[in-house]
Image (cartoon, rainbow, N blue to C red):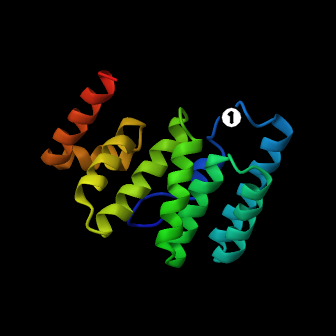
Amino acid sequence: MRTAESGYSLSDQAEEVAPLPAIDEQTLAALKALEREAVRLAEGGSVPAAMQKLDEAIARCPIYASAYNNRAQARRMTGDVDGALNDLDKAIEYGAGNAAILKQAFTQRSIIRKSRGDAAGAESDLAQGARYGNEIAKATIKQNPYAKLCSAMVAEAMKNC
């Protein structure tokens, strides 16, 4: 289930997320199973049921970043943009160091920020999405000289931290 505006799919993450050190293997396996079920439900057109599965995953493990990222996408699909932003903030917080999470979260948040008129925030998030490997963010930056400059400035700032 891909959305045209983001190119992002719920299923893009469920299989590629590396195990997080703070989550034991048995719990992680259960969380991934809930995510796979959520993807199946969403692809079948039952986004509210998919959100319930993602809610269950988050209730089981409140630091599981991938579930926040996927729930943000589902919330965007249902029009709950504020809820999506909150989930993306948590995905970024809990996904620190995990490029698979961060590339999606920053790119999704960039789309929302742009739609709300926050050009600077959108450009910053787009640069981060590209930095972590999101192909759509990379392509967008290549097409937009201003975004390319912003990306270079962010990269320079990150190097100096």
Neighbours of disc 1 within 10 Å: few (<14), some (14-19), many (20+): some
User: Which residue sits at x=67%, y=73%?
Assistant: 44
Q: Is residue 115 above or below residue 99?
A: below
Outermost residue, right direction? Answer: 26
Asked whether 82 or 47 is in front, the reply is: 82
Asked whether 22 or 76 is in front, the reply is: 22
Residue 35: image location, x then y, percent: 71, 56
Q: Quadrant of residue 21?
A: top right
Q: Amino acid at mark 1?
A: Leu
User: Which residue sits at x=86%, y=39%?
Assistant: 26
Q: Is residue 78 above or below residue 89?
A: below
Is label 1 in a helix, a strand or a loop? loop
In-image side of 101 versus 30 (left or right): left
Q: Quadrant of the N terminus?
A: bottom right
Q: Quadrant of residue 54?
A: bottom right
Residue 149: image location, x then y, percent: 16, 39
Outermost residue, left direction? Answer: 145
User: Which residue sits at x=41%, y=61%?
Assistant: 6
In-image side of 38 versus 159 (left or right): right
Residue 13: image location, x then y, percent: 59, 48
Residue 153: image location, x then y, percent: 21, 34
Asked whether 7 or 71 is in front, the reply is: 71
Q: Quadrant of the C terminus?
A: top left
In the rendered image, which residue does mark 1 sit on?
A: 20
Q: How many marks?
A: 1
Q: Is residue 98 above or below residue 34?
A: above
